[in-house]
Amino acid sequence: QVQLVESGGGLVQAGGSLRLSCAASGRTFSNRHMGWFRQAPGKEREFVAAITYSGGSTNYADSVKGRFTIARDNAKNTVYLQMSSLKPEDTGVYYCAARRLNGRTYYPDDYDYWGQGTQVTVSS
């Protein structure tokens, strides 16, 4: 079992940066591929970024490529999302999640553990 707690959200002006952290507890964290998703008001939860259990491979939504970077430190049981050049459309609640074994990268239903989320608001 994996417990996830996100932090680092806040209010930032367009063009600014934030770093989100996701602290995990549980013995199996280092064996899990991890992802970040976000949900804006009135919209469905959408994929943002993912990283394999070893950190050797990453994936990004087209809307954040070149601006966001996902990383992990298995020794600290933590996943990060570095966000730069933020835009108002990046506003939403950001969630980290642990992917099921053999789950698909981009689909929320294939992730079985979720944090409570952290709010990111980008003002124009």
Image (tube, helix red, strand yellow):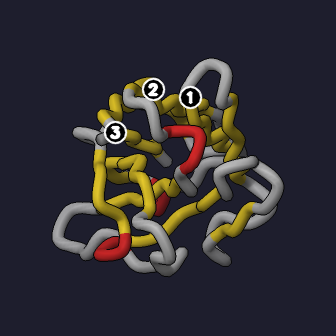
46 shown above or below 4? below
Q: Is residue 116 left or right of residue 67?
A: left
Residue furthest out toward the top: 76
Q: Is residue 24 left or right of residue 16?
A: left
75 shown above or below 9? above
Instruction: Say what amino acid the circle numbered 2 marks.
Output: Ala
Name the residue at 82% across, 54% down: 56
Q: Quadrant of residue 40?
A: bottom left
Query: Between residues 89 and 74, which one lies in front from this camera angle?
Result: 74
* Residue that badge 2 annotates: 23
Q: Does residue 20 appear in the picture of this structure? A: yes
* Residue that badge 1 annotates: 78
Instruction: Say what amino acid the circle numbered 3 marks.
Output: Val
Query: Between residues 51 and 85, which one lies in front from this camera angle?
Result: 51
Residue 117 - label: none
Question: Residues under labels 2 and 3: Cα distance?
Answer: 10 Å
- Counting from the top left corner in percent of width and height, residue 72 is at 67, 37
Residue 2 - label: 3
Question: Residues under labels 1 and 2: Cα distance?
Answer: 5 Å
- The mark tally for this picture is 3
Q: Does residue 10 appear in the picture of this structure? A: no
Name the residue at 30% across, 41% down: 1
Q: Is residue 45 left or right of residue 54?
A: left
Numbered disc 1: secondary structure: strand
Q: How would you rate the neighbour count of disc 3 (Cα within 10 Å): few for under 14, some for 14-19, many for 20 or more?
A: some
Numbered disc 2: secondary structure: strand
Q: How would you rate the neighbour count of disc 1 (Cα within 10 Å): few for under 14, some for 14-19, many for 20 or more?
A: some
Marks 1/2 in contact by CB < 8 Å: the verdict is: yes
Tell me the mark number nearer the camera, choosing from 3 and 1.
3
Instruction: Say what amino acid the circle numbered 1 marks.
Output: Thr
